[in-house]
Image: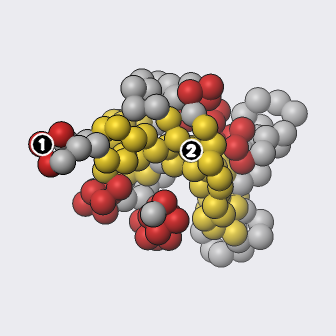
Amino acid sequence: MAAHDGNGWVECRCGQRHWGLHGAAGLLLLRDGAGDPTDGGAGTDVLLQLRAGWTHEGGSWGLPGGARDSHEDVVTAALREAWEEAAVPADAVAVIGSRLGVDHVDWRYTYVLAKAPADVAVAPRTEESDELRWVGLDDVTALPLHPAFARAWPGLRDELG
């Protein structure tokens, strides 16, 4: 049980390579109380990460997240990755659920849904992120999204209400 023992590629039965020997998880972090006060008040935002150009699907927007280690559940992995990549303190978020995004039997990706206070501070902590941005729920699709996140977003958005 070593830290980061999940790093590595899986040659999946679907014919693609996926990052995370034990699967992967991402944090779909929401905050209320933000938004443009000139259009009637505060909305709900989601934290998005612009993936660095050198990463898999670089130049696209997705969620902080990554490979699960062998000893981690999906919540632990998503919170660890959000801390490592975006300085999101685990004790500042309230997990509200999870949703299986992809299940290829030999590889899975899970979205962990959580809420944070409006004033939670975030900042890129690794070279994996070119930028972090809070984006209104209805504005997410205006960005060039990571392909897997783009496919999952309509269902996630519906679930968020």
Q: Earlier in the sequence, mark 2 or mark 1?
A: 1
The residue that disc 1 covers is: 38
Question: In this picture, is 14 found above or below 119?
Answer: below
Disc sitting over residue 51 in the figure: none
Q: Amino acid at mark 2?
A: Ala
Q: How many marks?
A: 2
Q: Residue at x 31, y 38 (%)?
A: 34
> Few, some or many C-alpha atoms within 10 Å of disc 1 (few <14, some 14-19, many ≥20)?
few
The residue that disc 2 covers is: 114
Image coordinates of residue 65 in percent, x first then y, are: 56, 44
Q: Residue at x 71, y 54 (%)?
A: 23
Q: Residue at x 51, y 48 (%)?
A: 28
In this view, the residue farthest toward the bottom is: 14
What is the CA distance from the residue labelled 2 to the residue labelled 1? Answer: 27 Å
Q: Is residue 31 visible?
A: yes
Image-based side of 9 in relation to 26, left or right: right
